[in-house]
Every structure is written in C-alpha cells, then in structure tokens.
Image (tube, grey):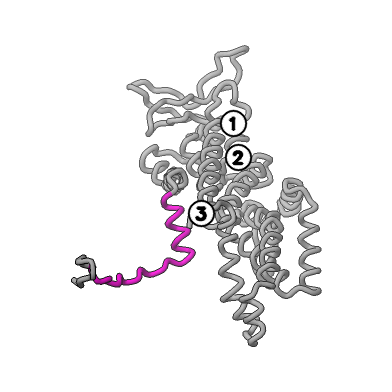
Amino acid sequence: MADTAAGLTVSPVVARPALPARGPWATAMAILLQNRAAMSALFVLLCIIAACLAAPLYAHQIAHVDAFQSNVDGEIDIDGTTVAVLEPNTEGLGLGVTPIGPTGRFATYWLGADSQGRDVFARLLYGGRNSLMIAGIATVICLSMGVLVGITAGFFGGLIDTGLSRLLDILWAFPVFLLAISLSVVLIHGVQLGPLSFDSGSLVLPILIISCVYIPYVARPVRAQVLTLKHSDFVLAAIGIGVPSARILWRDILPNVMTTAVVFIPLMMVMNIGLESALSYLSVGVQAPDASWGTIIEDGQGLLYSRPWVALAPGIAIALTVLCLNILGDGVRDAFDPRSQVRPG
C-alpha cells in the first residue's frame, strides 16, 4: 500500500498477462459454434449422413432385404398374417398389382414397396448415400478447380486472364440444366480419359458433369477477389521486395481466398444435390442398378395416387437436406465473411 497526501491508500497496479490473440479462423469458428440455428442444422445434416451411410446395415441386418433386387413374388409376415409384397389391384378392372403400403414397422417395409417389390426405405438410404456422395465430391472438385482458375486468372492477368475469362464466359452463357443434360447425353455411353475408362453406369460421370457446370460460379468471384488483393498494400510490398510469385500466392493470396471458398461449400452442396436429383430423375444421371433420390422419385411417379410415399420420401429427404444446408450456409457466411454483417468491436 502507498500513502497519499490525502491519507488515502492506493493499490499498486498489477500487470495482467496478455491473452493470446485468436486468429481469424479460430474467431470465425467460435462465431459459428455460437450460432444455434447453424449448429442445429449441422446436427440434423450429420444424422442424415449417418443414416445413409448405415444403409447396408439396415438392409442386411435389420430389414433383411436386397434394395436392388426385384421381389415381385415376395411375402412378409405381419402380426402372423402372410401378406404379398405386391398385392392384387382391387380398383377398376382389377388388373395389375399394387405395392404394399407403409407397414409402420421399422424392420419390415416401413415405407412400403415400390412397383418392383423393393423396400422403399432401404432404397431411400442407399439413394441418399449416392446423392450426398456425388454432391460432396463434385463440390470439392468444383471448388478446387474454381479457386485454381480464379487465382491464376486474377493474379497473372494478361493473356492468361483473357483466355480463362473467355472460357468461363462460354460456360456461363449456357443454362446450367441445359449444359448438364447435354453433357450427360453425350457421355451416356461412357468416356475414355487416357488410361481411365468409365462406363455409362459409373458414378464418376455425374460427378464430372456436375463439377464442370458450376466452375464459373466459383471462379468469377474468386478472380474478382484476387484482383482486389493483387493491388493491396501487403501484396504490393511483397512484390516490391522481390518475394517470389509462388510464395505470394501461397502465403498472401490463398489464405484470403479460402474464406470465400469455405462460404461456397454449403451453397455448392445445395446446388449439386438439386442438379444430381434432376439429372437422375430424367434418367441421364445415376443409372440402374444404382439408386439416388432422383431415381427413386422417378420410380414412384406412377404410384403417386396409390402409394405416394415412394416419391414423397425422397422428396422430403431432399427438402430437409437442402434446408439444413441453407441454414448452415447462412451461419458459415456470417462467421467467415466479415462483409456479411457488422460485428461489435
């Protein structure tokens, strides 16, 4: 304690240890983790992914069905009563058969059967696994190619920028669905890429098609951001002191562009899921015997009035997945894009 002229005592000031400053990525993650809506959407999305990954477990260990094998003569036991999977049609002239409807039993045709007697819920899980896998891989490829093209065009400029920009303009001029359908029709019989050969039923084809059509949507914003960064003070200073271009790209340009790429991930997933489902519904995406949410909707189109759950179930799955990705995307944008909102200092 120290005495003052007024008889008061003043405690000495004790310096507190400085807290380590959090980097921008840690700060963004902290903001994202505090967003309850985004975290709830992420939880639901992870549950959907986990359920789809468990498709073989459900089909073989719980339901004991083959989701890709027709079961037109199959029978199941419900409360001691043997019921045909494909029941005789009792409407109109009584011609044809009607698939069994939802049984309400998780282990026995929970959502009923389709027109070939296959378990709808088992196919829903398998189809979701393919749809999410195609959309996820296509998102990674599209973002990687878009960031690479955008950085190359924006940083080097000149003829490189002109050539890449014109190529992006050509792709941009085509409507997305028209371009995707055209590529699907051209590649429907398979494709040969050097030593690699992919037949018409390969999932690689829809992945490549979906990856290509959305590259301009990523590359153009990245190019614009790189043009801005290229004329920023820290990049000009690095160029002025003779820092190699590769080091500038790796240490100064790429870290600032990655936040934009991260914000694009949920958006691209939404767009890719929608495009994959549309192509598969039109029979130019995923091919039999594989399934996706789009192919299941197409299978159930003729059963909308008698067994609507065949088409409704994958439709609801797509809508729920897209909703979760949109909510998560809003949270990611608010956390990683400093221009999206004004944060208190």
Decide whether residue 273 is among the magenta residues. no
How far from the left and from the top, in percent, is residue 140?
58, 60
Q: CA distance from mark 2 to mark 1?
A: 9 Å
Q: Nearer the viewer, residue 110 or 113?
A: 110
Residue shown at 76% from the left, 46% from the top: 178
Classify 344 as above or below 22. Answer: above
Q: Amino acid at mark 1?
A: Gly
How packed mark 1 is, by other alpha carbons closer than 10 Å (few <14, some 14-19, many 20 or more), is many
- Quarter of the image with the N terminus is bottom left
Could you say which disc has been placed on residue 32 in the image? none
Q: Quadrant of residue 289?
A: top right
Cα distance, mark 3 to mark 2?
45 Å
In the current view of this chain or complex, which residue is farthest to the front? 5
Residue sitting farthest toward the top: 92
User: Against 311, is 165 above or below?
Assistant: below
Q: Which mark is residue 300?
A: 1
Q: Residue at x 42, y 23 (%)?
A: 83
Which residue is at the front of the view, 237 or 100?
Answer: 237
Residue behind mark 2: 295
Q: Which residues are magenta?
A: 10-34
Which numbered disc, 2 or 1, marks the residue that appears first in the sequence? 2
For mark 2, give the secondary structure: helix
Looking at the rendered structure, the kind of residue marked 2 is: Thr
